[in-house]
Structures are given as structure tokens and as C-alpha cells.
Image (cartoon, rainbow, N blue to C red):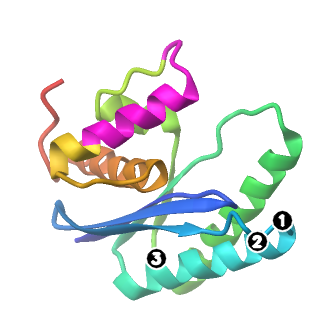
Amino acid sequence: MITVALDASTTCTGWSVFKDGAYVDSGSIDLKKDKDIEHRTTIMTKKICQVIKLYEPDKVFLEDTAKMTNVSTLKSLCWLAGGIKFWCHIQEYPIELVMPSAWRSHVGIQEYGAKRAALKEKAISLCRELLAVDADEDRAEAILINVSMLIRDGVIPALNK
């Protein structure tokens, strides 16, 4: 079974691929230099869909949009998620939204009271520890989204927390 997990953002998206519970590949799509939000979101959607198509997964996991105060950012993220979900449905790739608190809980990252930067640093450290992968924050979170869902689904054992 091939799974693709996405930590999707309009500026930099992390992605990861696992096959039968084993790490295969990961990367990030960085569009921070593109200042036009509509153009950037469209290009990001296309690039994410290219990654998914390349690996032809049995399942796609997409981090769900969490509550935020910046309405403009929320709208852009929802637009991006909608584009990815729509494309996956058309291509018949099953896709599941995963709340950040859910995947972090499965891999033992405690969110309560933690700042965003600290959560990202924990994800980077955990990727090094589990897979010896040096990843930026977006890639690290995509890897851990995949790991967490594989744990939840019983494909790999739970981590010793």
C-alpha cells in the first residue's frame, strides 16, 4: 500500500511517501517568492497533484485546516485543500483530512500550550530520530502525518513515547 501525506500550504508544502509502512521519499514545494496569492495557490495545487500522480497512492492524507484568526490565510488554505481534494476525487485517489492535533497525538507530540515554532522543531527532531531524515519543518510534518496515520491504521507499531 502506497500512502502520500501532505502538509499543504500556499507558500511551502511538505509531502511524504510510504510503501507498506516503509519510508520511500519526501520533499517540499517552495513557492515563497511568488507574491501573487491566486497564482501561487494555483501553481501549488498543480505541483501537489503532480507529486500525487507520480506515486499513484492507495491513500492520500492531507492535513486539515486548523482554526486561525487570519481570514485571508484561512480562505487561501481552504481553496488549496479544495483543489487537492477535488482533483483526488476525479482521479479516484482516496483522500482523508487529518487534524493537526490528531496526527501529533499519534506520534507523541504534545500540543497543549506549545508555540508553533516549538511544535515544528519537535517534528524535525522526531524525523531525525525515527528515520534519520534531515527535513525542513514542512517535510518533517508531512512525514509524521504519514507515520501517524500508518500507526492509527495498524500498518506500523505505535512509537515508544
Residue located beneath label 3 in the image: 93
Q: Could you say which quadrant of the image residue 110 lies in?
A: top left
Q: Tell me the element at label 1.
A: helix
Q: CA distance from mark 3 to mark 1?
A: 27 Å
Residue 108 at x, y percent in the picture: 29, 27
Q: Nearer the viewer, residue 93 or 158?
A: 158
Residue 129 at x, y percent in the picture: 18, 40
Comes first in the chain, label 3 or label 1: 1
What residue do we see at 49% from left, 14% from top? Answer: 112
Comes first in the chain, label 2 or label 3: 2
Q: CA distance from mark 2 to mark 3?
A: 24 Å
Q: Nearer the viewer, residue 52 or 44?
A: 44
Q: Are marks 2 and 3 in contact (CB under 8 Å)?
A: no
What residue do we see at 35% from left, 54% from top? Answer: 135
Left or right: where 118 falls relative to 12 = left
| First to last magenta residue range | 112-126
Q: CA distance from mark 1 to mark 2?
A: 5 Å
- The amino acid type, in three-letter code, at marker 2 is Arg
Residue 127 at x, y percent in the picture: 27, 46
What residue do we see at 34% from left, 47% from top? Answer: 144
Q: Tell me the element at label 2.
A: helix
Residue 33 at x, y percent in the picture: 72, 68
Residue located beneath label 2 in the image: 40
Specify the principal SS of the magenta part: helix
Left or right: where 115 falls relative to 67 = left
Q: Residues within 10 Å of mark 1 (few under 14, many from 20)?
A: some
Q: Are marks 1 and 2 in contact (CB under 8 Å)?
A: yes
